[in-house]
Image (cartoon, helix red, strand yellow):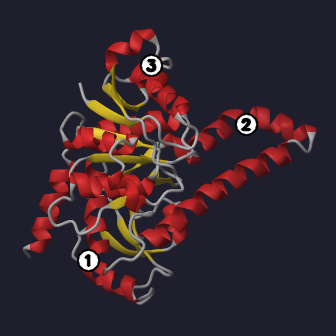
């Protein structure tokens, strides 16, 4: 079975929602979970019948969310450092962490290393559209980018769409302030010319195109991507709250809600980030899944499923092969 290292002490709410997510995942799929943290605290949260799937890696330090990610390399007893080391030493195939994302990225890059011909790793995340999901990258790993970085993000995103999302010909687009080729800043214009080499590149896309189902993969720098992601999460949260407020205003609205409850439940499922669990760090030699700091059990469970799917795929070899092909042209 596949070994997954879990940073059990990271996250905004401590170990309880993380362990609950691990338990939920084990109820649905078999794998070996290596829980990194304080074993005395963690063992009490594991049901007896699941003990055979659990191992423990002791870590007495937790890297706090407000700390500087550049210090992560010095904190060798932290749960995230030890979780990354389990992957480096081949004791685990993947790591899942809802802890400090900057520390996770730094440690993954420095301790695990980048794939051949990858200049910068990128965080890829799934956002809902009217048909399914849109993969967006980068959403925070790289604030300042060059056109060659965005080109590599496109290769990595396309590979993820094919290998993990099972999209045979993913429609690839570049985030800009207009669909026309002449639109955008200098970085966008330069990147557009590079992306023309890719058969699945369909041109520039605006922010609205993420949600209308017209594209499968959207490429952008980490600054704009992170703003895009947080804005999308904020809008989804506001819509949910506004609907609840309006439903409470009248008896007819409450009756209508009861009749349409299955549809509202389906909508919530579609826009809930916890359904996707976490964001893979693409371009790293092994599998690293970064979850939201506020992740609940469902998000952790789905992040683990992402880690299992990723670690059992050929995505990294596909990325290296594709980048090599374009580098040698």
Q: Is residue 280 positioned above or below 77 on the image?
A: below
Q: Which mark is residue 260?
A: 2
User: Which residue ends up furthest to the top in the rendered image?
Assistant: 49
Upstream in sequence: badge 2 or badge 1 = 1
Q: Secondary structure at mark 3?
A: helix
Few, some or many C-alpha atoms within 10 Å of disc 3 (few <14, some 14-19, many ≥20)? some
Nearer the observer, 156 or 180 = 156
Quarter of the image with the C terminus in it: bottom left
Q: CA distance from mark 2 to mark 3?
A: 42 Å
Nearer the observer, 86 or 273 = 86
Closer to the camera: disc 2 or disc 3? 3
Q: Which mark is residue 148?
A: 1
Closer to the camera: disc 2 or disc 1? 1
Q: CA distance from mark 3 to mark 1?
A: 47 Å
Upstream in sequence: badge 3 or badge 1 = 3
Residue 201 placed where, x, y %? 31, 71
Q: Residue at x 37, y 14 (%)?
A: 51
Image check: 38 left or right of 74? right
Q: Is residue 322 positioned above or below 52 on the image?
A: below
Residue 176 placed where, x, y %? 46, 78
Residue 205 placed where, x, y %? 45, 73
Residue 40 placed where, x, y %? 45, 21
Q: Residue at x 51, y 26 (%)?
A: 20
Q: Which mark is residue 43?
A: 3
């Amino acid at each position: 079975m596949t070994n997954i290292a879990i940073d059990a002490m990271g996250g905004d709410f401590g170990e309880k929602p993380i362990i609950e997510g691990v338990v939920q995942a084990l109820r649905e799929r078999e794998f070996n979970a290596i829980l990194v943290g304080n074993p005395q605290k963690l063992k009490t949260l594991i049901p007896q019948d699941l003990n055979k799937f659990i191992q423990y890696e002791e870590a007495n330090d937790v890297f706090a969310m407000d700390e500087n990610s550049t210090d992560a390399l010095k904190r060798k007893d932290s749960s995230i450092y030890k979780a990354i080391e389990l992957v480096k030493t081949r004791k685990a195939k993947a790591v899942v962490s809802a802890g400090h994302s900057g520390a996770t990225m730094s440690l993954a890059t420095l301790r695990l290393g980048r794939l051949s011909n990858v200049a910068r790793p990128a965080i890829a995340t799934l956002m809902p559209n009217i048909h399914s999901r849109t993969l967006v990258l980068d959403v925070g790993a790289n604030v300042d980018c060059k056109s060659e970085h965005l080109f590599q993000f496109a290769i990595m995103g396309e590979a993820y769409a094919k290998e993990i999302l099972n999209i045979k010909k993913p429609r690839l687009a570049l985030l800009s302030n207009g669909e026309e080729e002449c639109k955008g800043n200098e970085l966008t214009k330069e990147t557009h010319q590079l992306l023309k080499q890719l058969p699945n590149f369909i041109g520039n896309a605006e922010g609205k195109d993420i949600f209308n189902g017209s594209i499968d993969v959207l490429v952008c720098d980490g600054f704009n991507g992170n703003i895009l992601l947080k804005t999308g999460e904020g809008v989804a949260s506001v819509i949910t709250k506004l609907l609840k407020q309006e439903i409470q205003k009248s008896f007819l609205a409450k009756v209508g809600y009861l009749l349409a409850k299955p549809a509202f439940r389906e909508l919530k499922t579609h826009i809930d980030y916890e359904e996707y669990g976490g964001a893979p760090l693409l371009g790293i030699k092994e599998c690293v899944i970064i979850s939201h700091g506020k992740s609940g059990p469902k998000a952790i469970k789905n992040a683990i499923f992402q880690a299992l799917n990723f670690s059992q795929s050929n995505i990294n070899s596909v990325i290296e092969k594709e980048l090599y092909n374009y580098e040698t042209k």
